[in-house]
Image: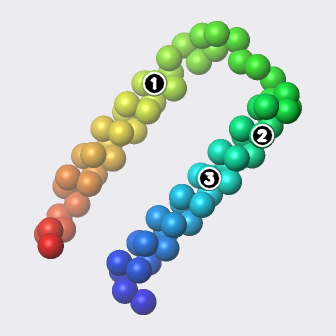
Amino acid sequence: MSAASRAARRIAFGGAWLALFSILYTTGERLGIWPPMPPGAFRDWDLAIGAVSTAALVAALSVSGRAGP
């Protein structure tokens, strides 16, 4: 099994896991299972963590050391 096929399997598994989580969470929210969050509950921490995570991912991909095709 090549590295490309292993990476493709990981990406497919990650996408399937994300889709399953999204479906379960959305269904639970529409059925009223999850309690509603009050406005400002996260105090924009979710945006800050997302921005830092995105910057870290871009940095990691840009210095991976692999040559392009």
Callout 2 amino acid: Thr
Q: Residues within 10 Å of mark 2 (few under 14, many from 20)?
A: few
Query: On the picture, is 5 further left or further right than 33?
Result: left
Which residue, given by chain and number where applicable, does mark 2 sit on?
27
Secondary structure of residue under mark 1:
helix
Residue at the (42%, 24%) spot, across then down: 48
Q: Position of residue 65 (x, y in %)?
A: 17, 64
Frontmost of labels 1 and 2 is 2
| Residue that badge 1 annotates | 47
Q: Which mark is residue 19?
A: 3
Q: Residues within 10 Å of mark 1 (few under 14, many from 20)?
A: few
Screen quadrant of the C terminus: bottom left
Q: Amino acid at mark 1?
A: Leu
- Residue drawn where x is 22% and y is 60% of the image: 64
Residue drawn at x 47%, y 64% as measured from the top left: 11
- Which of pointers 3 and 1 lies earlier in the amino acid sequence? 3
Counting from the top left corner in percent of width and height, residue 55 is at 30, 38
Q: Is residue 39 left or right of residue 5?
A: right
Q: For this view, does 27 lie left or right of residue 67?
A: right
